[in-house]
Image (tube, coloured by chain):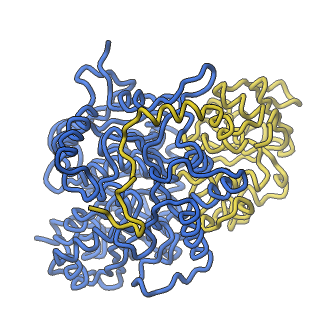
Chain colours: A yellow, B blue
């Protein structure tokens, strides 16, 4: 993935909690075998509603999504992350995230910023007052700020996720540096494999 | 030294290396694959000239997309067909055993692992599907991963992991007759909320959990993700061992005896300490139904639709109002008075033979209410064959239910089994999210017995109303 040091831009307030990954990208979009083009499916059911916030012209081109508690719960579909990024988002700010979603996001370079619900509400109020508000997230310093005001908060990100984002590291590449250790582990590990369990046609042998 | 939990034991057994300043590399014993979350992972392998490290620890089945019409019916949706073909090609190219549509071992990925006996205690099991926690019923550490991680496991058979926190969820006492594993699961999700288990691996414990069959335990572990948990599991006991001993691919003879001794290790020590503990009283658990759009929005089948004002915090009130609007329900409405259009009995939560027996016992000699469409989708071909050997297919067909081929089906509506906008469904699946079963569809989660009674009466109903 590409290194990510900062995400800046305008913010879309999605004032809902428990936004599950079925809402982010409905299952009809999951039949595709590609990794690209999912932006059109982002929140597709909600986008049918002309009043939905992403349909408001003032938020076109926003790069940060501001959500409520437990964003990205439910299905493990990484397509949710692909859809957000393909649409143009570089970061999601919420008071909490679904574990699998946050993990998937970290693999793709989508920044997940967890703030207290009070801070999320405060930022949402600022955005409500000025849809063109410029918000800046710094991955190196772990800060979110609104440069035009004095509003500035720090956030937590586990050190490895931060390093991976800053350096654009690829987990598989990192892991393969330990290939010797994996081979050694396998030599001493006796959990049953499927060897001999099924024949070439997939029928159970024995 | 403090006693260890099942999670601690499995974790310690699977540490490949714990480098300074990096997460631990955890070994994966079994990687389950299906057509939806794997194609981009295989593409990544090809782009990087990587191979599958352990095809003998990788097993694939077609489940999410497959039509449940008779097997002679072609896959009419070209996009679904392309994805199923991609799974065929990928498994062939990389030497992975695949159970395609129509194969005797095909079925929902979380049904087939346990029934074949490839899911065993002490293993680490992953799959690009959040309901992988189902396999935790066997004292295994099993959890869902995204497609990047699918690629990582294909290439390296390991995952970088930080240790999870542990949570004991203990259900004391005995449940009343008519209360199923699904009702226990809904009670737990309701209690914890959609985020209560975040960062934790839940271990289900207590007499009401020990009393469950393996199939009931799978239902319980299946819904761990609905409480936000990374995984859910249950320690090994005699029930686990008896189930495994009869599985087609489990060890036999002397190897079985050795395996039994090894498996029994995967129960928590008496003095094990958990990071969090939650206790429920089985006596408080009743047959339940969800009323809203997340699986924690649960009410007793005997209860009424709640009002937003019933909830203490503002966020829950707002969620409730949104859910009521979407579900087109008014506060105070008795759940038993709410009519349904569709009943779905299936999914990795409730499509095993015991689920079908429970539903058939209610349906037998009755008929689906006029205007209601009721589908029964067995979890696998083995479940389907077993049910047919017991005559359950006849019971369902005589009662006006559809008896279909195995797959994920209407749980998530990736195949043609979908709700139409505005339709209301009593479903034995795991998620009542907006549009989950089809755009604009309204889902209420229930147990198989409740689903069958609801089909017969055309409104939410308990088996006693049908059987009286």
Q: Quadrant of the C terminus of chain B?
A: bottom left
Quick check: B206 above or below B345?
A: above
Left or right of B172? Residue B88 is right
Q: Nearer the viewer, residue B116 or A6?
A: B116
Q: Nearer the viewer, residue B58 or B41?
A: B58
> x, y (%) of residue B156?
57, 42
> x, y (%) of residue B282?
20, 42
Q: Nearer the viewer, residue A101 or B35?
A: B35
Q: Nearer the viewer, residue B63 or B445?
A: B63
The quarter of the displayed image where residue A139 is located = top right
User: Which residue is most to the right?
Assistant: A148
Q: Quadrant of the N terminus of chain B?
A: top left
**Residue at the spot x=20%, y=40% of the render?**
B260
Left or right of B29? Residue B1 is left
**Residue at the spot x=76%, y=48% of the render?**
A89
**Residue at the spot x=37%, y=45% of the render?**
B190
Q: Is residue B120 visible?
A: yes
Q: Is residue B107 visible?
A: no
């Amino acid at each position: 993935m590409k290194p990510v040091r900062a995400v800046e831009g305008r913010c879309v307030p999605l004032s809902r909690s428990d936004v599950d990954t079925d809402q982010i990208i409905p299952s009809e979009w999951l039949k595709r075998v590609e990794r690209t083009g999912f932006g059109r499916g982002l929140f597709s059911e909600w986008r049918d509603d002309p009043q939905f916030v992403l349909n408001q012209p003032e938020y076109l081109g926003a790069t940060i999504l501001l959500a409520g508690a437990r964003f990205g719960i439910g299905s493990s579909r990484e397509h949710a992350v692909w859809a957000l990024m393909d649409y143009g988002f570089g970061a999601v700010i919420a008071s909490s995230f679904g574990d699998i979603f946050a993990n998937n996001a970290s693999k793709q370079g989508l920044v997940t910023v967890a703030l207290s619900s009070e801070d999320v509400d405060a930022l949402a109020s600022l955005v409500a007052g000025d849809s063109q508000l410029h918000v800046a997230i710094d991955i190196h310093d772990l800060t979110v700020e609104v440069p035009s005001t004095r509003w500035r908060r720090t956030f937590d990100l586990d050190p490895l996720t931060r390093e991976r984002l800053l350096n654009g590291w690829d987990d598989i590449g990192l892991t393969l540096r330990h290939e010797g250790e994996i081979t050694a582990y396998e030599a001493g590990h006796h959990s049953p494999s499927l060897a001999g369990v099924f024949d070439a046609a997939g029928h159970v042998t024995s | 030294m403090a006693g260890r939990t099942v999670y601690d034991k499995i974790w310690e057994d699977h540490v490949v290396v714990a480098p300074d300043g990096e997460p631990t590399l955890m070994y994966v014993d079994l990687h389950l694959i299906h057509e939806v979350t794997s194609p981009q992972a295989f593409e990544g392998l090809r782009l990087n000239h990587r191979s599958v490290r352990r095809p003998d620890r990788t097993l694939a089945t077609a489940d999410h997309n497959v039509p449940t019409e008779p097997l002679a019916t072609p896959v009419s949706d070209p996009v679904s067909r392309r994805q199923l073909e991609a799974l065929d090609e990928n498994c062939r190219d990389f030497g992975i055993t695949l159970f395609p549509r129509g194969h005797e071992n095909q079925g929902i990925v979380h049904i087939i692992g346990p029934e074949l006996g490839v899911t065993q205690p002490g293993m680490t099991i992953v799959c690009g599907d959040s309901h992988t926690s189902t396999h935790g019923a066997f004292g295994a550490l099993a959890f869902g991963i995204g497609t990047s991680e699918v690629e990582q496991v294909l290439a390296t058979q390991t995952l970088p992991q930080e240790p999870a926190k542990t949570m004991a969820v203990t259900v004391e006492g005995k449940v009343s007759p008519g209360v199923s594993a699904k009702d226990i699961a809904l009670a737990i999700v309701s209690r914890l909320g959609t985020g209560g288990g975040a960062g934790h691996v839940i271990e289900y414990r207590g007499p009401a959990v020990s009393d469950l069959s393996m199939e009931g335990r799978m239902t319980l572990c299946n819904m761990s993700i609905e409480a936000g948990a990374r995984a859910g599991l249950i320690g090994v006991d005699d029930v686990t061992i008896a189930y495994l001993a009869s599985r087609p691919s489990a060890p036999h003879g002397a190897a079985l005896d050795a395996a039994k001794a090894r498996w029994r290790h995967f129960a928590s020590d008496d003095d094990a300490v958990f990071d969090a503990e939650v206790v429920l009283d089985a006596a408080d658990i009743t047959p339940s139904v969800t009323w809203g759009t997340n699986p924690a929005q649960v009410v007793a089948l005997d209860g009424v639709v709640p009002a937003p004002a019933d909830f203490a915090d503002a966020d829950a009130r707002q969620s409730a109002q949104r859910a009521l609007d979407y579900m087109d329900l008014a506060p105070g409405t008795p759940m038993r008075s709410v009519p349904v259009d569709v009943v779905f009995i299936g999914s990795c939560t409730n499509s095993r033979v015991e689920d079908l027996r429970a539903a058939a016992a209610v349906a037998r000699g009755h008929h689906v209410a006029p205007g209601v469409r009721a589908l029964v989708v067995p979890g696998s071909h083995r479940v389907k064959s077993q049910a047919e050997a017991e005559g359950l297919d006849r019971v369902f067909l005589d009662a006006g239910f559809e008896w279909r081929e195995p797959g994920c089906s209407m749980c998530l509506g990736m195949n043609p089994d979908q709700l139409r906008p505005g339709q209301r469904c009593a479903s034995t699946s795991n998620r009542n999210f907006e549009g989950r079963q089809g755009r604009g569809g309204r889902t209420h989660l229930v147990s198989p017995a409740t689903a069958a009674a609801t089909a017969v009466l055309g409104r939410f109903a308990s088996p006693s109303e049908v059987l009286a």
